[in-house]
Image (cartoon, grey):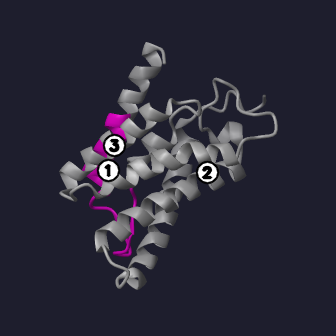
Amino acid sequence: MNSSLGIRHIVQFVLFVALQILLMDSLVLFGTGFCFIYIAFLLFLPINMNRVLLLFFGLVAGFTVDIFYDTIGIHAAASVLLAYLRPMILNLLTPRDGYDTNDSVNIHVMGWRWFLAYALTLILAHHTAVFLLEIFSLEGLSSAIPKILLSVLFTGVVMVILQLLFFSIKRANR
């Protein structure tokens, strides 16, 4: 990872975590749907990211949110789960030609179907972990399911908007 790429990821980390803490904490859809924008940092990392580094980034991102939300490791655990599952999902979704070494997660390059399958699968895993760890029992599952589904939809829409607004189209015609 070169230094300009490293600085870009640090800026993205600070931006997404700050947005989560300052804005998304108070933005709740219908009192049920939560947007965990900080996971965009993990979702949008380069495809060929070192797995150990990815797990470390997941722990740091989740733990940072836990500190401000006072959630005692819930977000850290869910983010590490997302980071652990990410290479497996990328492997399942590998295009016929494979990934280029310079590819990053980009809706313009990979296409809508690829991006939605990738993002929604990982967002669902993350949100399920967050809300099940929050209730810490299967009795509250009926109240957690609407939270999970609406939050996945809310976060997924925000991820698509972020991709469309801030990610480059320049390599879309490869």
Amino acid on which disc 1 is placed: Ala
Question: Cβ–Cβ below 8 Å for labels 1 and 2?
Answer: no
Secondary structure found at label 3 = helix
- Residue denoted by label 2: 118
Which stretch is magenta? Answer: 13-36
Distance from Cα at disc 3 to Cα at disc 2:
20 Å
Which mark, residue 59? 3
- The answer to which of 163 and 79 lies nearer the viewer is 79
Image point 26% across, 54% down: which residue?
A: 73
The answer to whether 138 is drawn above or below residue 25 in the figure is below
Residue type, mark 3 in image: Leu
| Residue shown at 52% from the left, 37% from the top | 166
Residue lying furthest right: 96
Residue kind at label 2, given as amino acid type: Tyr
Q: How many marks?
A: 3
Which labelled disc corresponds to residue 76?
1
Residue 59, x across and y down, in percent = 33, 43
Judging depth in this view, the residue of 113 and 87 nearest the camera is: 87
Quadrant for residue 102, please give it. Answer: top right
What residue is drawn where x is 42% and y is 31%?
53
Query: Where 122 sits versus 46, above or below?
Result: below
Q: Position of residue 105 (x, y in %)?
A: 59, 38
